[in-house]
Image (spheres, helix red, strand yellow):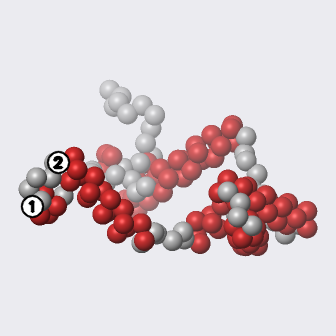
Amino acid sequence: MRELRKADANLALRDAMKAAEEEYQQIFKKAEVPKKPAEDQAEWALPAAAEAAKEAEDQARKLGKSQEEIAQAGREAGERAMRVAEEAGVYAPPKELPLFMQARLQQQSEAARLAAMPAPTAGENSRPAEMMEPRRLALKLPADTKDKKKKR
């Protein structure tokens, strides 16, 4: 935009902005980013379904249909391929767990994560009793009693 205003001192700011936007569109309109094939396959669990969807979209493009119709044709072809795979027993869709089972699995994974953590080692008193037991046996110390107070 500055370059345009330097070239023509009488050019208004708004006109310079419009000219810069047009120039930008001309430059970058040619260099469109191609759609990655990984994005297409992310929608379908089976490669055959992704391939069927792509072929249906290509055929719809050749027939000159609108973008919505192209997307609809691809979606229908992919769904048909997935349905055929399910009926043939090649593919089983993932089952969604009930909410109470999801909560239970989350609790179990949290418990497993906490159990895998090392015990704190700041001092002997911070160690759990399970860690102290081998040491007690090695030193031949008596087991702890419930009442730690000395009897007088």
Residue at position x 54%, y 69% from top? Answer: 35
Please indicate whether residue 138 sits to the left or right of residue 3 in the image: right
The mark nearer the N terminus, 1 or 2, is: 1
x and y percent of residue 26 in the render? Answer: 36, 66
- Foreground of the two, 114 or 73: 73
On residue 122, the disc is none
**Hey, which residue is sitting farthest front in the picture?**
10
- Foreground of the two, 45 or 119: 45
Residue at position x 82%, y 65% from top? Answer: 81
Residue at position x 63%, y 46% from top? Answer: 105
Kind of element beneath mark 2: helix
Kind of element beneath mark 1: helix
Q: Is residue 40 visible?
A: yes
Q: Is residue 49 visible?
A: no
On residue 13, the disc is 2
Which quarter of the picture shows residue 22? Answer: bottom left
Q: Residues within 10 Å of mark 1 (few under 14, many from 20)?
A: few
Q: Quadrant of the N terminus?
A: bottom left
